[in-house]
């Protein structure tokens, strides 16, 4: 028999873990936008130390030669970039701890719905793989493909966590009144999630191009970066209109069909708010010289959009299934 307290503990840990994953996506975006990805040229240590140096005097005089021999050319110690990347790693470690606690707390479902436990166990294994992939990203000297794969895996991890928590609450979700919502909504939601993934995929290509442009400009003269943007940027920008109007249609249909206190309506408000923030961040990247603060916000909002869409879909599934 699963106690209410144990189920509540699992749900809270799961929600905290989801928030932590989104936070590390934000921090990772900051690392990438600031060019701090190689702030620590080795892994898991940073400049050979578990606690990174704060001044170049703490490193050997020939540290650049040492790291050049290891395959990291042009290594230049920068305390801000070093500690930015190190903070990113610390946040990643904290997520690992939260994932372990979430998987451990999910054992209460072994005698009920075993799939919840196995979902959490899968997340734990994926996070371990994500940690290894993080080291591979550093070892690859920040190859764009590796960075993109690292981000997409984080998106998948969040989706699995959302599904596991929602599945543990399926009795509650089945009480949601969705009787007046068109059955077409679920189909359109699947299309909307597909559109979001396509948009994220194009966004990663834009980011890879921006990373190259930033490197060429040595992360200065941002007002001139836009002149070198590839065609995919303009496709990505125009495609956002399709994403916007598709989600507007979904939110409008939900607004018409449910009561004010319905969780689906609250989720639709959240969805449109996040999309609005993503668009504003995208416009500032386009028109205001690619400000560093906008890049991680734009990336984070894109990830949250998919998460909210996925949760709405699960809510609709369980509310119509009436488990």
Image: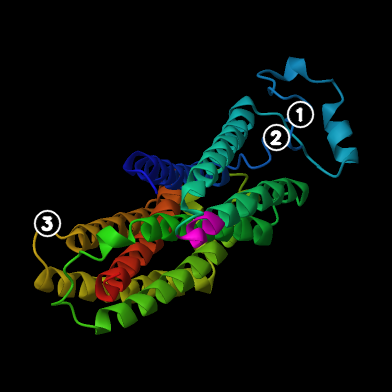
- Vertical order, 232 against 262 (above or below): below
User: Pointers 3 and 2 in contact (CB under 8 A)?
Assistant: no
Residue 163, quarter of the rendered image: bottom left
Task: Describe residue 137's horizontal placement relative to residue 152 as left or right.
Answer: right
At 24% from the left edge and 59% from the top edge, which residue is drawn? 267
Q: CA distance from mark 1 to mark 2?
A: 6 Å
Residues drawn in magenta: 113-119
Of callouts 3 and 1, the N-terminal one: 1
User: Pointers 1 and 2 in contact (CB under 8 A)?
Assistant: yes
Q: Residue furthest front?
A: 1
- Indicate the colouring scheme: rainbow
Q: Closer to the camera, 84 or 221?
A: 84
Task: Describe residue 134's horizontal placement relative to residue 176 as left or right.
Answer: right
Secondary structure mainly formed by the magenta segment: helix
> Which element type, helix, strand or loop, lies under badge 1?
loop
Task: Name the residue beneath numbered marker 1.
Answer: 47
């Amino acid at each position: 028999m699963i106690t209410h307290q144990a189920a509540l503990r699992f749900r809270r840990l799961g929600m905290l873990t989801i928030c932590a994953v989104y936070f590390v996506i934000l921090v990772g975006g900051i690392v990438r936008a600031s060019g701090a990805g190689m702030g620590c040229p080795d892994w898991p240590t940073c400049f050979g130390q578990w606690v990174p140096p704060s001044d170049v005097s703490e490193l050997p005089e020939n540290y650049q030669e040492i790291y050049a021999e290891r395959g990291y050319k042009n290594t230049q110690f920068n305390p801000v970039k070093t500690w930015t990347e190190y903070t990113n790693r610390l946040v990643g470690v904290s997520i690992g701890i939260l994932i372990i606690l979430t998987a451990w707390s999910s054992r209460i479902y072994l005698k009920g719905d075993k799939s919840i436990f196995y979902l959490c166990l899968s997340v734990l294994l994926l996070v371990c793989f994500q940690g290894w992939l993080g080291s591979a990203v550093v070892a690859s000297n920040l190859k764009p493909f590796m960075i993109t794969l690292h981000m997409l895996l984080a998106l998948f991890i969040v989706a699995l966590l959302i599904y596991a928590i929602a599945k543990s609450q399926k009795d509650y979700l089945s009480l949601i009144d969705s009787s007046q919502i068109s059955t077409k909504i679920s189909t359109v939601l699947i299309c909307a999630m597909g559109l979001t993934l396509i948009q994220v995929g194009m966004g990663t290509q834009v980011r890879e191009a921006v990373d190259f442009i930033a490197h060429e400009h040595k992360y200065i003269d941002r007002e001139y970066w836009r002149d070198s943007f590839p065609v995919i940027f303009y496709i990505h920008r125009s495609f956002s209109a399709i994403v916007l109007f598709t989600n507007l249609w979904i939110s409008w249909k939900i607004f018409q069909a449910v009561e004010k206190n319905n969780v689906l309506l609250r989720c639709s408000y959240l969805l449109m708010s996040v999309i609005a923030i993503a668009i504003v961040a995208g416009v500032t990247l386009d028109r205001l010289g690619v400000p560093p603060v906008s890049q991680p916000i734009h990336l984070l909002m894109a990830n949250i959009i998919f998460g909210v869409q996925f949760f709405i879909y699960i809510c609709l599934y369980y509310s119509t299934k009436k488990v």
